[in-house]
Image: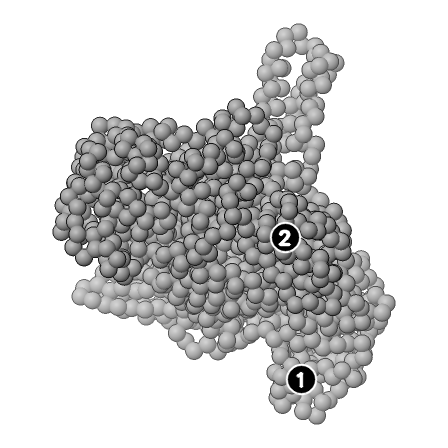
Amino acid sequence: MRTGRAQAELLLGPEAPRLRGTLCVTGHHLLLSPGPQDLWLLLLRNVDSIEKRVAGESGTITLRCKDLRVLQLDIEGVEATLDIARSIEALSSLESVITSFPFFYRPKGLRLGDAWHFHPPESYYKRVARETKAWRLSEVNENFSLCPSYPRAVIVPRAVDDKALALSARFRQGGRFPVLSYHHARSGTVLLRSSQPLTGPQKRRCAEDEELLRAVLAGARPGAQGFVVDTRSAQAAKQARMAGGGTEAKAAYPGWKRLHRPLERGRPLQESFVRLVEACGDLEQSTDHWLSRLEGCSWLAHVKEALSTACLTAQGMEREGACILVHGAEGTDSTLLVTSLAQLILDPLSRTMVGFQELVEREWIQAGHPFQLRCAHSAFSHARPKHEAPTFLLFLDCVWQLGRQFPLSLEFGEALLLALFEHAYASPFGTFLCNSEKERCLCEVRSQTHSLWSRLNQPKEQRKLRNPLYVLNPLALWPSVEPQSLQLWQGLFLRWTRPPEPPEVAWEKVWQIVTEKRKTDDSQPTASASEPQP
Amino acid sequence: MEHIRTTKVEQVKALDRFSTSNKSLTGTLYLTATHLLFIDSHQKETWILHHHIASVEKLALTTSGCPLVIQCKNFRIVHFIVPRERDCHDIYNSLLQLSKQAKYEDLYAFSYNPKQNDAERLQGWQLIDLAEEYERMGVPNSHWQLSDANREYKICETYPRELYVPQVASKPIIVGSSKFRSKGRFPVLSYYHQETQAAICRCSQPLSGFSARCLEDEHLLQAISKANPVNRYMYVMDTRPKLNAMANRAAGKGYENEDNYSNIRFQFVGIENIHVMRSSLQKLLEVNGTKGLSVNDFYSGMESSGWLRHVKAVMDAAIFLAKAIMVENASVLVHCSDGWDRTSQVCSLGSLLLDSYYRTIKGFMVLIEKDWISFGHKFSERCGHLDGDPKEISPVFIQFLECVWHLTEQFPQAFEFNEAFLLQIHEHIHSCQFGNFLGNCQKEREELKLKEKTYSLWPFLLDDRKKYLNPLYSSKAQRFTVLEPSTVSFSFKFWRNMYHQFDRTLHPRQSVFNIIMNMNEQNKQLEKEIKDLESRKNKQTDGVPTKELLHSIHPESPSLKTSLCFKEQTLLPVNDALRTIEGSNSADNRYSDYAEAFSKSEPAVVSLEYGVARMTC
């Protein structure tokens, strides 16, 4: 690292006032102190791309952040500008996990190790065990030998022993054999997820894998049918056979039918995100141009596809009483998108503050969504995308759409979704580090970093994250997926560009009304209680 | 009545236009003198006013019956299947006749009777008093006077009798200027901004052709700019695209030549004409009516319709106007061709930005009365109240409402009224149930004796005030006195609740709005009760409560007794589209082309009990 210390002026946005002070680059942060008491701080990990320009005696650095903010730094001195730019460049792209900031972050008021045992799959199993006896918790993956991307414990049919699981794992890509994702008690059906079977061009079969799916149907409500929701097109699934993958053959899995619902993934999804963010940064374009870019990026089409596949899955369980297995290829991206959204639709508990955190932990983090690879860069990076894809962001967007259509049914507000987006891409907390539970164990993430959940569950954060209007809605949420009903998530994509006039102000007012109501509600009984009794 | 051949048809099916499940409701169709009524098997009633019907179409006979598609001016589209073709034919013919009246006297307003006596009716009409409104603005004053030049509609038939002009504008100047203006619509005051002493004036295009000029008109403009003691120059805003204005010169009309008028700054703002707007909305509706519309087709359709571009153009013009007054302190004269469409849009929207009074319920009524009704926006022709020239129909007023809606979205605390209020006004510009929007100008309205034969809409809306209140409204917020909306492209959105008001499946399933509204109500009521209790407690001197007091300690507070949900229904606006659909039915939505795959073994019957189950809160 070169010394980075200079006089600079910071421009946070087109409308915001300028900050002036001493700029300093440390190991993990960019600091600017405009006065003796003030400190402005940016996590270097948050920098997605950096652009420098020098003219005369000063230079300008434009930082585009992973949370979609664009910052401009005007720095005195050409040499200082170049030094600082180089430092930021080098420090923001460090790949090593164990030297990353979460391993050094020791905030006041939080204890290391808190909340890390808040959401293990075991706790979900306790709930399942109360509802049905057909499933058991297996520790067959204790040392991550069967499947490196699964957690140590997984929920599997009681009728299938660990030996069979091991064989089924060998028949599935990355060892991701079918495991329980959600048990829908009302209809007695289950939602499973896995990766694609390795049928290959020879159409291989695996007796244990077939047995596993047969046991699933046997354990569900009598006469239940099974559906495999493949998140690839029929053609793509067929092509995957050439590379050793494939999809379940009808004959081999009696009682199971296949549905193909192609969802966009990987690079095209990342490009869609990049193009949308690009369009959202252009304040000068005409409405026509804006609409055509909104169409061109297809982001909302992806939202619609994801939501409607999740709805289809949920519908199959609730209406048709069918068991559903969801997978694509690796089973770590669009698969999780579908299973987690389907739970949100069906399960009122997952719509609570705690339930949603558990859902994210269980269905994304523990389920092995490779956050480090997917979120290495956000929408501004010039680097050629390798493994980046905003699948998790797409999930958050879909949740936001649900929240728009059922504004009273989610216990959390937009702020939680925004926080999860930010922290997934760059965070002082360890929660979203690494690609799997195995890696997190190797890096000792649990003992060496703080959990994001303990921060979010602090009372002062909760006030910001909660939905003041929440009332428990025991029904399934069936959203409309018509294009007229889906909206661009302005709070995220236009967060830094929209005018400061403020849904926030209105939100504050809503809070006011609600708290006032609680107050008056409370004072009503006191008023009568304080009356003298005859 | 003579048009009605069949009054009742049973076993009629109503299809949902967005559902792919071919689900239908069976019920009975009734034809009354004023409404088409459908009562389904759940006893839910759908009333369609004949005047709301924009078109009726009879499709080719199918095995289940004869399909009848009715498109309404409030963007409701209903699809009936009538079992017998003869019945269908009868209804079709009756509706064709009933929806297109030839005479004003046959419109609903002339038979509508809300059981009020003549005094009440008159009182209703006196609710909005424009003289009072000009007084509120601060005119007449030393610069502006009330002119009686048009008292007998002699100078301009489409203007009101009472007009405000600069103090120095004498009658000969007015007469001279009116001869130089299309349809005699000479420059008059629309809004006076007390704080800056600048004025918004309106007129029609000058008959300038390629070189004609008129000294009186030049004098009148001079007088307007002199009436502003702060700033000597004034803006003349031609709201048309430059090309259109130039084309008009060939017909002996056109625009002001800056060389002939002293101290004017001339500006085109480029809002398209009524025909462009009509076909733009038509395109928009076509796109949105498509079954199985994809996201990309939706946005490319929105783009190619150009509707939001037009909305933005109107908004831009209003902002230009407001800025000229606020920032430069300059008066502005606005015109288009005849000065009753685009001019009304820009003047009213500009005033709305400048003056928070127009953002209240009463103020908005006044604004519509002033800039639209009294200045002769041709409501009857633009809305097609009578069977007339379809080329005169245009959504100019809807566009104004949409601009206001965009403002309410950008400034959630600045308006006293809510979206339901805008939708209700839209409902009634077409309903012909009240007299306000009948006719094309004040003179015509007087000839129709509307004030004696029909009722005014405004008192009815005021009676229902509660339904139209914005719970977030904060009248104190001083910084909202002048609105400065953003016109960045993202600020313009599709107004789902207007164009899909009746397509319940497309709407959010729960409404924050109603809940907050109720909470607010309850807060107020509870506070009142607490105050009551306290004051009674204080009055009690001997400390021994009487029986009566004890009773009041546990008041049968209606707000506490009824659950939120229950109250919600009673407080709801008449539009059932705004009703919340908690839960909802997954079969209403197109999740999949494969959805059939699930239910191959079963018949495609969807029972309603899943969806309509209401949430208990």
> Residue B195: image x %, image y %?
27, 34
> Residue A493: image x %, image y %?
45, 60
Q: Residue at (74%, 68%) from the top-left corner?
A: B63
Q: Is residue B137 left or right of residue B81?
A: left
- The residue most toward the bottom is A202
> Residue A32: image x %, image y %?
33, 55
| Disc on res. B94 | 2
- The residue most toward the front is B2
Circle 1 marks a residue in which chain?
A
In this rendered view, identify the residue nearer to me: A437 or B474: B474
Which element is circle 2 on? Answer: helix
Could you classify mark 1 by the number of other residues whose Cα lies within 10 Å: few (under 14), some (14-19), or many (20 or more)? Answer: many
In this rendered view, identify the residue nearer to me: A407 or B344: B344
Which element is circle 1 on? Answer: loop
Q: Which residue is mark 1?
A: A246
Q: Residue at (71%, 57%) from the top-left corner?
A: B87
Q: Is residue A59 visible?
A: yes
Q: Residue at (68%, 39%) from the top-left corner?
A: B566
Q: Nearer the viewer, mark 2 or mark 1?
A: 2
Q: Is residue A362 left or right of residue B304?
A: right
Q: Residue at (36%, 29%) from the top-left corner?
A: B131
State the quadrant of the C terminus of chain B: top right
Q: Is residue A119 visible?
A: no
| Disc on res. A82 | none
Circle 2 marks a residue in which chain?
B
In this rendered view, identify the residue nearer to me: B13 or B270: B13
What's the amino acid at mark 2? Ser
What's the amino acid at mark 1? Gly
Determine whether B22 is above or below B147 in the image.
below
Q: Is residue B470 left or right of residue A22?
A: right
> Residue B221: image x %, image y %?
20, 42
